[in-house]
Structure formats: structure tokens, C-alpha cells
Amino acid sequence: MRKTLRNIAFAAVAAITLSPLSSCDRLDDDRIPVTPVNITFQTQADWDIYGVPGALSWKRFIRELRQPANFPYTEMTYTGFGGILLVCDVLGTPQAYDLACPVERSRDVRVNIDPKDEYLAVCPKCGSKYNVVSLTGHPVAGRAAEQGFALRRYYVGTGRGNAYMVVSN
């Protein structure tokens, strides 16, 4: 009897503890198709020009539109499904997201940073807002927040010779 009560108590604690992790509360950051990403900044000077050197700075990379116009794109440069949003979060850490809104799931519907709106990434079509400077692309308003759709994230790190690179996870 004592063992049964202990097992029931353990199950109840586990259910309460794990309930926030249930599928209803999880964010879906896989709505944008897996697409290659490879952006390399060969030198520190390249990073200083084209990267995000400080908190709240951001850049958009869309190879087919040549954005930014003077970035040295190569045949090995890939910019994801809708393009790449490279941001520097509030702690000064570079983060990368696909520009495509996960609600719309279209290459041509891209989020934009609104510096007047707490540096949120905003979808021009559905109006969803994503926090990319402190909540790693989590939705904070609109249909994305209602449905739990987060921006697809990519890895930002150092490559050969400590050059920064953005790549698919």
C-alpha cells in the first residue's frame, strides 16, 4: 500500500512538472522547410562590415535579391528558404533566423525588424510578431503566437580561422 501511494504521488508530481512541456505548449519552429544555409564572413573586417557587431544590430541576407548589395556572395553561399535575418541579441550574441514567416510559409513573405516596436520581427502579411533579440524567435503576437509558430533558427558560430559563419543546424 505504501509503495502504491508513493508511486501515485510520484506520478502526480511528474504530471504537474511535465505538463508545461506537453504538445499544446510547445513551439513549432519546423514549419519552414529545411533549406541549406551557408554564409561565411572570411575575416573580422568582413564581419565588421556585413555582420552584426553589437546588441540590437541586424542585417538581412537574400542571395537571389543580392541583399546586401555589396556582400561577396559565392556559389557556396546559401540563404535559406526566405533569406536570413542575422541579429545581435540584447546580450551581444549573434542569432540567425529564416526571414520567411512560419504562418505564411512563403519564400516571398518575409519578416522585417521594426526598431520602433521593441526590435520585433513583424510579418507584413499576417501581422505576427516575433521576439528575436531576447526570446530566440518566439512569437509574441498575432496568429503565430496563437498557433505556437516560431521562426526557424540557424547556427551562428566560428569557422576556420575564427571567421564567423551562419549554417543550417
Image: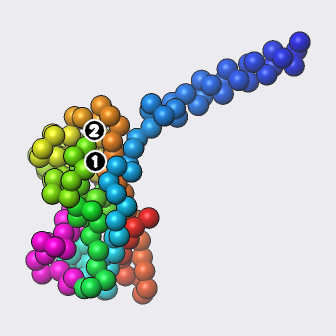
Which class describes the residues within 10 Å of circle 2: few (<14), some (14-19), or many (20+)?
many
In the figure, 142 relative to 63: above or below? Answer: above
Residue denoted by label 2: 144
Residue in the picture at 19% in, 74% down: 63
* Kind of residue at disc 1: Pro
Tell me which residue sits at (31%, 50%) in the image: 151
Whole-percent x, y for residue 160 in the image: 43, 85
Residue 64, compared with residue 5, is above or below; it is below
Left or right of 41? Residue 142 is left
Instruction: Please identify the quadrant where the C terminus is shown.
Output: bottom left
Q: Is residue 57 visible?
A: no
Q: Name the residue tied to disc 1.
A: 102
Query: How packed is label 1: few (under 14 Cα within 10 Å), some, or many (20 or more)?
Result: many
Residue 147 can be seen, yes or no: yes
Depth check, front residue: 145 or 92: 145
Residue at (52, 34) in percent of width and height: 21
At horizontal 38% and vertical 49% (from top left) the residue drawn is: 29
Mark closest to the chain's N terminus, 2 or 1: 1
Give the amino acid type for the residue marked by disc 2 in the picture: Ala
Q: Which of 58 and 24 is in front in this view?
A: 24
Mark 2 element type: helix
Specify start and end residues of the magenta stretch as a single range. Answer: 52-73
Relative placement, left or right, of 42 versus 5 is left
Kindly report the secondary structure that dominates the magenta region of the rendered protein: loop
Left or right for 138, reference 49 = right
Front residue (pair 106, 46): 106
Location of residue 34 by image quarter: bottom left
Residue 93 sits in quarter:
bottom left
User: For residue 77, which numbered disc appears in the image?
Assistant: none
Q: Quadrant of residue 39?
A: bottom left
Query: Do labels 2 and 1 touch, CB within 8 Å?
Result: yes
